[in-house]
Image (tube, coloured by chain):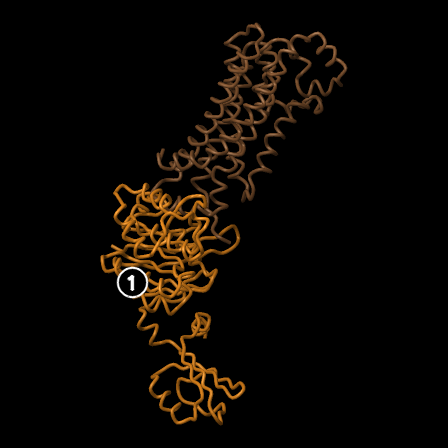
Chain colours: A orange, B brown
Amino acid sequence: MSIIEVNNLTKFYGKSRGIVDVSFKEEEGEIFGFIGPNGAGKSTTIRLLLSLIHPTSGSARVFGKDVTTHGPEIRRDIGYLPSEIFYYEGMKVIDLLKYSASFYNHDCTQRIKELSEVMELEMNRRISDLSYGNKKKVGIVQGLLHSPKLLFLDEPTAGLDPLMQRKFFDLIRTENARGVTVFFSSHILGEVQRLCTRVGIIREGKIVEISDIRSLQKNNYKKVIVTADKLSLATLKMPGVTNTQLENGTLHFFFKGDINSLLKKITDLKVTDVTIEEPTLEEIFMHYYE
Amino acid sequence: MSKNIFLHEFRTRLKSVLTWSLGISALILFFFSIFPSFAEQAELTTQLLSKFPPALLEAFGMNRMNLSTILGFLSLVMVFIQLCLAIQASNYGFGLVSIEENELTADFLLSKPVSRARVLTSKLLAAVSSLLVTDLVILLVTFISIILFNGGRTYELRTLNLLLLSMPILQLCFLSVGLVISLLVKRVRSVTPYSLGLAFGAYVLNAFAGVFGDVKLEYITPFKHLDPVYIVGYAAFNSPLVLLNLAISLIALGASYWLYIRRDIPAVS
């Protein structure tokens, strides 16, 4: 049985598009990456699965139960970290966490203590006094304190400093190792690659690709920028090089293939600077449209 | 009903309840402090009032009240109390789910394992309790005022009870109508304009009923249904209108559940 099973799910807000005909499955224990630019429909999908909004057509099942009819039951085992955190401003952190815990049937005190220690949370501060990053930390503890079986993370790393990001990823990996299934939405390909086993790519409300993270990487373009003496458009001409542009003695291009053969060619040059980086999501999407 | 949501909601409104209760109490005490001199010079008062424009007297129902008796005087005070309670109840009605949606805490609450119906029931009961606390304070202050300023005059307890009972019925109506309107419009950005509009609108509809000529618009306003001057004058409720009022509340509540369960919770935009 799949943990999440989405069939032809469609959501329109009046006339404006949310998602169109989205279908995918997530199996138990997976970390599924859901990537797409802002406004592609990532949050819409998550909100549909949480029954915060209702589908226009199609259906979705979580833990094998329909989300529109079994919402409360399903949500017992779901943890949700929204992309932007809004809590009751007047409350103290500890009171908010206790309020959150009061919705679940088991005692969460120990778990709150553990998690807030890991995330270095100050329990007695007011929500309204917290910075964006600190609110995010409250969100993380809040999403995990009831030991959910399925985690929805909606662009979870925004606002966290790199150190916290690492702690957060470790936390997610530990949870995953205990059998927790994770649905990870993001527009940053790098973090999805670090964490996820399988990804779905969504663009303008439609799924354009679902694949293994490995095959995605293998098929992926690298963005290469080389600054060197006597460059011309033809200098690095070889199979796999596309979109070459020359600007002020700097060569920009995409490369797909065995990176060693490219490196060999570059070492022949008198190089002042080389950058090889992940293409942005937009650039990957360009690839899907070619 | 979920106890934790109820308690959370009740606590959130505690400050507001305190403010309204104290405000209305001050109003009652102030009015009753001038009652003795008012009643003693009832004759003079009547003369004085006769010089007022009839339309104004009609608007406040003052031409039909006997300000020299405790209940007659209280019916004047009750007009103002009802207006205050209507604003308060509309405030709670309009804000019941919209504040949570505006401040985007609705995501937090509704991603918890509770059904929408349960959430709404808990919220409604918390709001009703808050309103009843206000009523209780008003009840106490009214009795204290009467004891302090009665000047030996007597009154009929049964009619007084009816006057006090008019309060929760009126509140329930404004609470549920406010709620259903907040669910019908796309987004309530600020509660106050809506609640003042509803309360004063309903008040004006009753006060200036004559203006509309033959169209009996006043029959849709709770202020007409629970008119204190009528209650004191007849020592009874205007039963058909009170039933109409309760029907409006029930329909508004039913519609609210229907709408809220099907509602798409707005996200950050």
Residue B93 in the image: state x and y as whole percent: 51, 34
Q: In which quarter of the image is residue B190?
A: top right
The residue that appears at 37% across and 55% down in the rendered structure is A137
B88 versus B145 height, above or below: below
Q: Quadrant of residue A3?
A: bottom left
Residue A12 in the image: state x and y as whole percent: 48, 52
Asked if one can make out residue B139 in the rendered structure from this viewpoint, the answer is yes
Q: Mark 1 points at which residue?
A: A170
Depth check, front residue: A105 or B144: B144
| Left or right: residue A253 compared with residue B58 | left
Q: Mark 1 lies on which chain?
A: A
The residue that appears at 46% across and 31% down in the rendered structure is B127
Depth check, front residue: B217 or B137: B137
Depth check, front residue: A100 or A210: A100
A81 versus B247 height, above or below: below
The residue that appears at 53% across and 85% down in the rendered structure is A247
A31 versus A101 height, above or below: below
Q: What element carries label 1?
A: helix
**Count of residue discs:** 1
Mark 1: few, some, or many residues within 10 Å (few <14, many ≥20)? Answer: few
Residue B83 in the image: state x and y as whole percent: 59, 26
Asked if one can make out residue A53 in the rendered structure from this viewpoint, the answer is no
The N terminus of chain A lies in quadrant: bottom left
A219 versus B136 height, above or below: below
Depth check, front residue: A23 or A266: A266
The C terminus of chain A lies in quadrant: bottom left
**Which amino acid is tagged 1?**
Asp
